[in-house]
Amino acid sequence: MTHTTRPQLAALTSARFFAAFHVFLFHMGVMKGLSHAPAWLQKFASVGYVALTFFFVLSGFILVYTYAGRDFSLRQFWKARLARLYPVYLLSLLLAAPFFFYAVLKINVPELAWFKTHLASALVLVLTMLQAWVPQAALGWNGVAWAVSVEIFFYVLFPVLLARFSRISNQGLAAIGLACWLLALATALAYVVLSPDHIVADASYNDRSWLNALKFNPLVRLPEFVVGMACGYWLVREDSNPKLATPLVLGGTAVALVTTAFSHLIPYPVMHTGLYAPAFAAIICGLALRPRWTSFLEFRWLLLLGESSYAFYLLHVMVLGMFLFPITPQSPTPRDLNSFVPLATPGRLIGAAVTTTVVAVLVFRFVEEPARKWLRGKPRPHAAPTPTST
């Protein structure tokens, strides 16, 4: 393991945008915006939630790549992590507040019933990034922010796991990664078999306690992060073979696409939690080995989109909602979800995508970067750099 500065993995930064855009397509489908889209696009969008598995695997990978073999203090680590996450997280909550409070107080939404009687608790959980631990609260305020709550738990465990994993051989880490993946699948299959919510689960259910725990609980999502950490060590220990780059990227992509094609045959809980982890791990490892044909992912404009992907992820649902469900002074006051009919014209869908992208870039440039630099202060000599792809 080397203590020299490791090169930036630009391709992985760019790949973040494509993962975030997959989530965007998923929510566009959930909002009935793709009803007239080609069947292949509807199929691809319908599994957009699996992009969170990509993010969790990538997070473990990049944190190991950044911090393994380097001295750093917990204070430095947490200062960097919170400076990276909280400013845009808080901004997203401020922007989402009018939509959330209006929905809770004025509209009959079954998924928000819990918040009507536990609003104060929900607000505390979300502001402290603990909402993913409470199934009913996981999607509160800004629903997609549950993933940040999960990431915070990963950061709590990371320094401990890093110290333990540094003493384990690559074969041992591979075994741990495989065991974690199988554990994630077993947990999902147990839900399918036991059916504690007494439903045939699909993406339309967001108010069932056991299903929400399966999808959003940090402990359940931890195996995906561990798979990423194991892959990160494989790279930083210089045991990797550059000739594997193209087979890993193409093989992982092929497995992911085939799984998506047959997703209608796979139970939704299994699809949602960890199934894609090996395929995404292969893609991440392959891109990290920088095959020449992926050099387009290092274009400056793609890097900017990748750097803006965190803001894109946190803000996209609000922008989508404003384009698909515009409210004018002449609009009747909606009382339940059935009152909302999407205006899903091609122009509005393209406008939502472009607007979300532009807003995300502006937030990255004028909020995220300045706030991070201000909160972190002047870097100390030999301090570990901030991961660029988490």
Image (cartoon, rainbow, N blue to C red):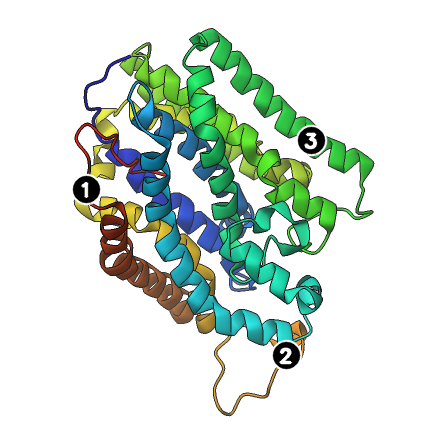
Whether residues under marks 2 and 1 lie with C-beta atoms below 8 angstroms apart, the answer is no
The quadrant in which the N terminus is found is top left
Mark 1 residue element: loop
Q: Earlier in the sequence, mark 1 or mark 3?
A: 3
Residue 192 location (% of width, % of height): 75, 37
Q: Which mark is residue 106?
A: 2
* Separation of residues labelled 3 and 2 (CA atoms): 37 Å
The answer to whether residue 312 is seen in the rendering is no
Q: Earlier in the sequence, mark 2 or mark 1?
A: 2
Occupied quadrant, residue 61? top left
* Separation of residues labelled 2 and 1 (CA atoms): 46 Å
Q: Residue furthest bottom?
A: 330
Whether residues under marks 1 and 3 lie with C-beta atoms below 8 angstroms apart, the answer is no
Residue at the (33%, 29%) spot, across then down = 73
Q: How many marks?
A: 3
Instruction: Report the front residue among 327 and 235.
Output: 235
Instruction: Report the front residue among 61 and 249.
Output: 61
Q: Is residue 257 left or right of residue 107?
A: left
Q: Which mark is residue 245?
A: none
Whether 316 is drawn above or below 242: the answer is: below
Residue 51 location (% of width, % of height): 48, 42
| Circle 3 residues within 10 Å: few <14, some 14–19, many ≥20 | some
From the image, tell me which residue sits under label 1: 299
Mark 3 residue element: helix
From the image, tell me which residue sits under label 3: 187
Q: Mark 3 is on which residue type?
A: Thr
Q: Earlier in the sequence, mark 3 or mark 2?
A: 2
Q: Is residue 40 left or right of residue 5?
A: right
Residue at the (41%, 14%) spot, across then down = 166
Viewer-nearest of labels 2 and 1?
Answer: 2
Residue at the (36%, 24%) spot, across then down = 285
